[in-house]
């Protein structure tokens, strides 16, 4: 009997006008600046790398302890430690330019002027495919109110950033809101080209023997498999309400997890906490995704995007 030929599916996708050879990206803050994982992962095989968050000036982050493992996840309060935009451009980005992989720079600040300043600095730098704007930061000029939990502030911030750059702009939304759709619509109205969701959920852990918080910062961002159902639900809600492409993230560990997000409406996915458990997680998830598509006879991954949201 003649053996049936099984063809590998087309895994290429586009997000915010950025072409990716496959839907697998790295979530900001979990993959460093790429070089840290190059011993374990062929960076050319990834769809894209979203680098650790970059601010206008260097930030030293929070005091330790800054990480605590939880059932099915982890809490972190690193405090967005980074060397600042100039060192990133001069010392981190040159390494990434050697790879045929999209580089998306996550940016943040503590005032509207901070965001605009870092974006303007990155706008004409070669080797950057797009920007991901982390709006889950407290606005120091508004008494610490978080940009991403006030719809008007989020719109104003993203509108200002949009005017400051020609690069594709992706808004990373906070899940710590009442209605995620309202914020997705604000991002779309501001001129953003895509969305990333979800960021971490706000959580806390307490040492019952010492009777003190496990983190020096008291609270931190909860990530990992525990938050996946929340992430999938929010992607599904947003995909039904806006036309912007979505990068889904939150608790992805297997190829099946990744396809679940894409069925909910994501065009690409970002792998985060799984990188700490398994440094080859990105490629293992990519292989798992490809195998599942082949088993189901799906020739193009784009066929499944939003299939549940549209149905």
Image: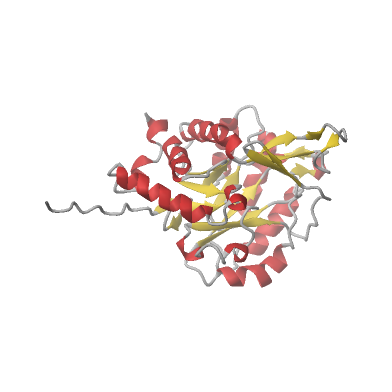
| Depicted 189 relative to depicted 28: above or below | above
Q: Position of residue 283 (x, y in %)?
A: 47, 56
Q: How is the image coloured?
A: secondary structure
Farthest left residue in view: 1
- Left or right of 59? Residue 169 is left
Q: Position of residue 110 (x, y in %)?
A: 77, 48
Q: Residue at x 37, y 28 (%)?
A: 311
| Depicted 166 relative to depicted 237: above or below | below
Of 306 and 25, the residue lying toward us: 25
Of 296 and 94, the residue lying toward us: 296
Farthest top residue in view: 178
In this orientation, does residue 209 appear?
yes
Q: Position of residue 279 (x, y in %)?
A: 57, 56
Identify the image quadrant of residue 265. top left
In this orientation, does residue 193 appear?
no
Of 170 and 200, the residue lying toward us: 200
Q: Residue at x 60, y 28 (%)?
A: 179
Identify the image quadrant of residue 204. top right
Q: How many marks?
A: 0
- Left or right of 75? Residue 168 is left
Q: Position of residue 4 (x, y in %)?
A: 18, 51
Of 176 and 115, the residue lying toward us: 176
């Amino acid at each position: 009997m003649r053996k049936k030929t099984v063809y590998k599916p087309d895994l290429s996708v586009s997000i915010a006008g950025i072409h990716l050879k496959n839907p697998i990206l790295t979530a900001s803050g979990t993959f460093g600046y790429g070089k840290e994982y190059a011993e374990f992962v062929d960076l050319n095989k990834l769809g894209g790398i979203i680098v650790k968050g970059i601010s206008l000036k260097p930030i030293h982050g929070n005091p330790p302890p800054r990480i605590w493992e939880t059932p099915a996840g982890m809490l972190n309060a690193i405090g967005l430690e980074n060397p600042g935009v100039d060192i990133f451009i001069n010392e981190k980005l040159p390494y990434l330019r050697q790879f045929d992989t999209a580089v998306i720079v996550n940016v943040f600040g503590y005032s509207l002027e901070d965001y605009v300043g870092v974006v303007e600095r990155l706008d004409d730098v070669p080797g950057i495919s797009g920007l991901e704007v982390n709006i889950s930061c407290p606005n120091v000029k508004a008494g610490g109110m978080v940009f991403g939990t006030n719809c008007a502030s989020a719109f104003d911030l993203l509108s200002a950033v949009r005017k400051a750059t020609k690069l594709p702009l992706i808004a990373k939304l906070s899940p710590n809101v009442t209605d995620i759709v309202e914020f997705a619509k604000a991002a779309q109205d501001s001129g953003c080209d895509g969305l990333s969701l979800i960021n971490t959920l706000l959580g806390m852990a307490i040492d019952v023997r010492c009777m003190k918080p496990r983190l020096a910062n008291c609270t931190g961002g909860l990530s990992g498999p525990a938050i996946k159902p929340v992430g999938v639900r929010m992607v599904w809600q947003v995909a039904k309400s806006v036309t912007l492409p979505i990068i889904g993230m939150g608790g992805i560990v297997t190829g099946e997890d990744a396809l679940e997000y894409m069925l909910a409406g994501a065009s690409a996915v970002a792998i985060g906490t799984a990188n700490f458990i398994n440094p080859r997680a990105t490629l293992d998830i990519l292989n798992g995704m490809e195998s599942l598509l082949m088993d189901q006879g799906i020739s193009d991954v784009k066929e499944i995007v939003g299939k549940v949201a549209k149905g």
